[in-house]
């Protein structure tokens, strides 16, 4: 998906050619049924038909001879004047052939669209959604390669006429796209698993076909990935599991969702794969409430320096699998991710694309916001704790205007979800399949949790935030070190946030952190080389000794990682002096002991969370606003509830949080 998004940005599109091929159509403006947030109109608009050539070796689907036409959503929808959209494929268009460099449709969007219609049918009984789920699942199966060494893997792209395109332009890995484990194979398992569960009683013959095709792709995962079950490798000094799909806890999580659904519906053959992938995901939990990445389940085994929001359903998969297998060891990392990391993310600004390891990619998209919502609601369902439902309401409010642009990103009146929110507040008003799908997945989850839906839709503005901040190394107020510009911001396994600063022994630097009412943790982001040690002293923070870790399976030698200072900083300035070895800094992550988010609109919601080492007294609530305040510990367990007509003082335990709803 990341490669596809990059390709989309660089694609050369011919507007004139598009005007001949496709018609710009306004998104429908029909109102959803009363009380429902889910509106499928825009996703319906993206759907189109394709008839693949007959007798393509290695590709077939259910009742293909009787029903040769397939259904699929166009990949992109570009905004046009008057609130209309134009359906667009991926990569450059060849006007002579009508083919795109990538294709018109893709397995990633087909699978997730199938999940949308399947869940909508299950939630509402809508026969139209049942039919579209059926059609899309047939398309999903057609993308699978059914024989040969790549059996069970999936071809990603399809042209408008139904011809598969195994090797896209620009090139994506694996190439051909069915030659190895991939995100699209994982998402195929997700769709087939949920589809099998939905059709098991409704259409046993079709369900049997889906179960067979689920076994086909599960077999590819067992052959290419789970054959390494129980093996661990090193990645920049961290021990990581070797049996994740594409080395990704993110890809593996989406497969676990499908496998778990199938097991619940009676497919015992999927249980072992579901459990083993879930164990690998749980092993990617990292950090602590006081150290980066603050208990997050990291997505990529090849880098302990990356967390990204898109596809971050790792906690959801762990919650679902933990519930299925009655295994608290799977649920526990998901809880820490929610209570420590997600609270940090919310108070820092919302679902940024990437903290790599500093918050370098602050674009926000529906995929990332939805992944957080799905994870929180899955935890709420598994644990029964209201803490996670309340956090889900605060996170889902992003779709309704509680973001740094104050913009509605999902519109229940049209079903349109905008493609992204830039750091400067600019909204990308295109509405392609991925964003549309993930806006709808959140809407469906909220419709299944009406109380959370009511809260989220009522919170439409960010009133204030105090949370994690980042100070660039080159912004030192005083230094005799050397500022440099990296050859590339991307290191191969992490990202520089901008320029860097190198301090040789006896050189120093000072940064102004600004005023604060509370103590703050400071985590210098340090670039190291394997086996090389640097020692520095930080005023009020103590000594920092850092030795570059062994490379292991990470793509490049050296690492760019945050290291927490021993003591918190209480003043406005922080100063460092290099003592031994060159100290190379990207910047400083600054995290207050008490962070806060206040959302407004037709309701008021406030989150306060603590990264302190001991209980902290703080205020919560607003004068003249009746509210209910709940205080939770670091496990999400409720400690106390207070009703108040104004601000009230509470004691937040170490690693815990409080939420006021008014």
Image (cartoon, helix red, strand yellow):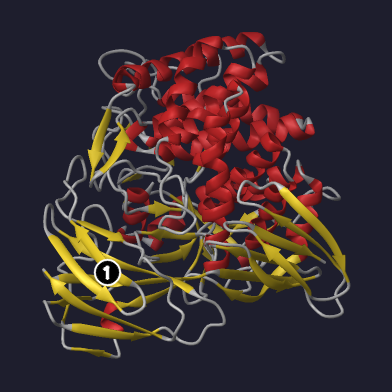
**In the picture provided, is 265 more to the left or to the right than 21?**
right
x%, y% of residue 650?
73, 67
Tag count: 1
Q: Residue at x 69, y 43 (%)?
A: 445
Which quadrant of the figure has residue 471?
A: bottom left
Neighbourhood count class around disc 1 (C-alpha, 10 Å): few under 14, some 14–19, many 20 upward: some
Q: Residue at x 62, y 70 (%)?
A: 596
Quadrant in the picture for the C terminus: bottom right
Looking at this view, is 436 or 20 the one in front? 436
Seen in the picture, residue 194 relative to 420 is either above or below; the reply is above
| Kind of element beneath mark 1 | strand
Q: Which residue is under mark 1?
A: 543
**In the picture provided, is 217 more to the left or to the right than 340?**
left
Q: Residue at x 58, y 21 (%)?
A: 325
x%, y% of residue 150?
28, 20
Outermost residue toward the bottom? Answer: 478
Can residue 369 be seen in this snapshot?
no
Looking at this view, is 531 or 36 the one in front? 531
């Amino acid at each position: 998906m990341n490669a596809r998004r990059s390709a989309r940005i660089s694609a050369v599109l011919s507007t004139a050619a598009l005007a001949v091929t496709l018609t710009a159509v306004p998104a429908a403006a029909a109102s959803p049924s009363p009380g429902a947030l889910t509106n499928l109109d825009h996703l319906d608009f993206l759907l189109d038909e394709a008839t693949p050539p007959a007798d393509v070796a290695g590709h077939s689907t259910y009742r293909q001879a009787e029903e040769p036409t397939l259904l699929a959503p166009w990949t992109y929808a570009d905004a046009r004047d008057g609130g209309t959209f134009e359906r667009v494929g991926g990569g450059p268009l060849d006007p002579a052939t009508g083919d795109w460099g990538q294709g018109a449709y893709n397995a990633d969007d087909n699978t997730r669209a199938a999940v949308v219609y399947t869940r909508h049918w299950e939630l509402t009984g809508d026969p139209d959604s049942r039919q579209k789920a059926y059609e899309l699942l047939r398309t999903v199966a057609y993308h699978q390669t059914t024989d040969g060494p790549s059996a069970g893997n999936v071809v990603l792209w399809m042209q408008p006429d139904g011809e598969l395109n195994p090797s896209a332009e620009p090139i994506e890995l694996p190439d051909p796209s069915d030659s190895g484990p991939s995100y699209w194979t994982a998402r195929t398992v997700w769709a087939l698993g949920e589809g099998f569960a939905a059709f098991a009683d409704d259409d046993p013959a079709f369900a049997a076909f889906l179960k067979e095709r689920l076994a086909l792709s599960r077999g590819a995962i067992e052959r290419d990935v789970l054959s390494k079950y129980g093996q661990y490798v090193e990645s920049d000094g961290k021990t990581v599991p070797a049996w994740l799909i594409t080395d990704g806890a993110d890809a593996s999580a989406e497969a676990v969702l499908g496998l778990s659904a199938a097991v619940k519906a009676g497919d015992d053959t999927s249980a072992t794969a579901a459990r083993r992938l879930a164990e690998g995901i749980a092993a990617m939990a990292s950090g602590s409430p006081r150290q980066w990445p603050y208990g997050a389940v990291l997505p990529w085994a090849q880098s302990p320096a990356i967390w990204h929001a898109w596809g971050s359903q790792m906690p959801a998969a762990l919650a679902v699998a933990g519930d299925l297998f009655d295994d608290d060891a799977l649920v526990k990392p998901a809880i820490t991710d929610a209570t420590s990391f997600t609270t940090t993310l919310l108070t820092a600004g919302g679902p940024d694309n990437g903290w790599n390891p500093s918050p370098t990619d602050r674009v926000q998209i529906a995929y990332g916001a939805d992944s957080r919502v799905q994870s929180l609601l899955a935890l709420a369902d598994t644990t029964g704790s209201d803490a996670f439902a309340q956090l889900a309401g605060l996170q889902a409010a992003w779709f309704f205007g509680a973001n740094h642009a104050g913009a509605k990103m999902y519109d229940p009146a049209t079903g349109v979800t905008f493609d992204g929110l830039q750091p400067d507040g600019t909204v990308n008003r295109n509405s392609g399949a991925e964003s549309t799908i993930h806006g709808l997945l959140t809407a469906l989850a909220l419709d299944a949790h009406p109380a959370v839906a009511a809260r989220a839709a009522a919170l439409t503005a960010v009133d204030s935030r105090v949370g994690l901040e980042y100070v660039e190394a080159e912004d030192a107020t005083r230094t005799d070190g050397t500022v440099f510009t990296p050859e590339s911001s991307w290191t191969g396994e992490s990202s520089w946030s901008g320029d860097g600063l190198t301090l040789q022994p006896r050189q120093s630097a000072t940064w102004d952190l600004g005023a604060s009412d509370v103590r703050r943790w400071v985590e210098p982001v340090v670039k190291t080389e394997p086996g090389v040690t640097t020692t520095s002293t930080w005023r009020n923070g103590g000594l920092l000794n850092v030795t570059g870790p062994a490379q292991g399976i990470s793509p490049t030698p050296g690492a760019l990682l945050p290291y927490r200072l021993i003591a918190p900083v209480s003043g406005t300035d922080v100063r460092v002096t290099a003592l031994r070895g060159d100290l190379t800094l990207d910047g400083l992550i600054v995290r207050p002991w008490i962070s806060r988010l206040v959302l407004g609109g037709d309701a008021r919601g406030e989150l306060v969370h603590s990264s302190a080492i001991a209980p902290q007294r703080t205020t919560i609530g607003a004068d003249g606003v009746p509210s209910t305040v709940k205080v939770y510990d670091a496990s999400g367990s409720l400690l106390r509830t207070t009703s108040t007509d104004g601000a009230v003082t509470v004691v937040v335990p170490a690693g815990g949080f409080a939420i006021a709803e008014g």
